[in-house]
Image (cartoon, helix red, strand yellow):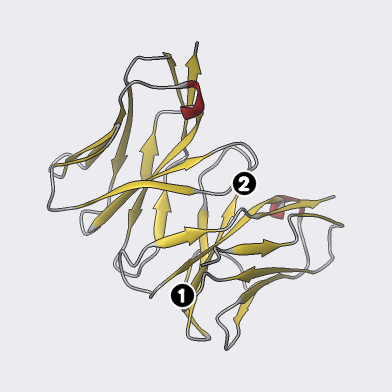
Amino acid sequence: GEDVEQSLFLSVREGDSSVINCTYTDSSSTYLYWYKQEPGAGLQLLTYIFSNMDMKQDQRLTVLLNKKDKHLSLRIADTQTGDSAIYFCAEENQGGKLIFGQGTELSVKP
Amino acid sequence: ETGVTQSPTHLIKTRGQQVTLRCSSQSGHNTVSWYQQALGQGPQFIFQYYREEENGRGNFPPRFSGLQFPNYSSELNVNALELDDSALYLCASSLGPAENYGYTFGSGTRLTVV
């Protein structure tokens, strides 16, 4: 079956790095995504990674993919208070359907 | 280039009623997907429309139905509303139905069923 799991909460200090982890089950997923959702808002695409890649870096964001363990992580360097939000990991199945995790609430303390 | 717009932003309905939610896709996008996000949960796929035809459906009952129009805008209809239908309904449009055409999400419609 298709399932995506994330830890529910993460709290960090401003300026620290944040690491949000995700596991997924569908080994046929070719794209994996990270979305950000601020209170009362829709989903904002942060970054994505193709399944034949191990790592992707985009400014403060680093995505690591361990395809063998079906583990995905998002690292945010120099975390700011504006990064406080809920972060969703999603895998995309071959039909173009996104399967989301439950979301990780990131709290950044000054 | 406009993004995805959804209307209304908020809606309150009574159990048993019917509701129609609307989505205007981003310019150039021919595929629309609908998701339901219950409070504290991740979005769940309802269905996808590609060139006016349903192109995949999630685990939702038939009282959830949709339409896509020639301009690629879309409607989500829910009949016989239940309390558990209270959620944020998100629409996403993309250039096509296959993988990684890129999804643009709207801000959602917050539906409350009382």
- Residue named by callout 1: B29
Classify residue B109 by image quadrant.
Answer: bottom right
Q: Same chain for the residues at labels 1 and 2, yes or no?
A: yes
Q: Is residue B42 visible?
A: yes
Classify residue B80 by image quadrant.
Answer: bottom right
What amino acid is labelled 1 in the image?
Answer: His
Dot 1 surroundings within 10 Å: few (below 14), some, or many (20 or more)?
A: many
- Residue named by callout 2: B38
Dot 2 surroundings within 10 Å: few (below 14), some, or many (20 or more)?
A: some
- The residue drawn where x is 26% and y is 56% is A31
What amino acid is labelled 2 in the image?
Answer: Ala
Task: Tell which circle, 1 or 2, labels the residue nearer the N-terminal end.
Answer: 1
- Residue A1 lies, in percent from the top left, at 33, 55
* B73, above or below A83, in the image: below
> Quick one: A60 or A27, which is closer to the camera?
A60
> Quick one: A104 or B102, which is closer to the camera?
B102
* B56, above or below A39, in the image: below
Q: Secondary structure at mark 1?
A: loop
- Seen in the image, is A55 located left or right of residue A44? left
- Seen in the image, is B74 located left or right of residue A23? right
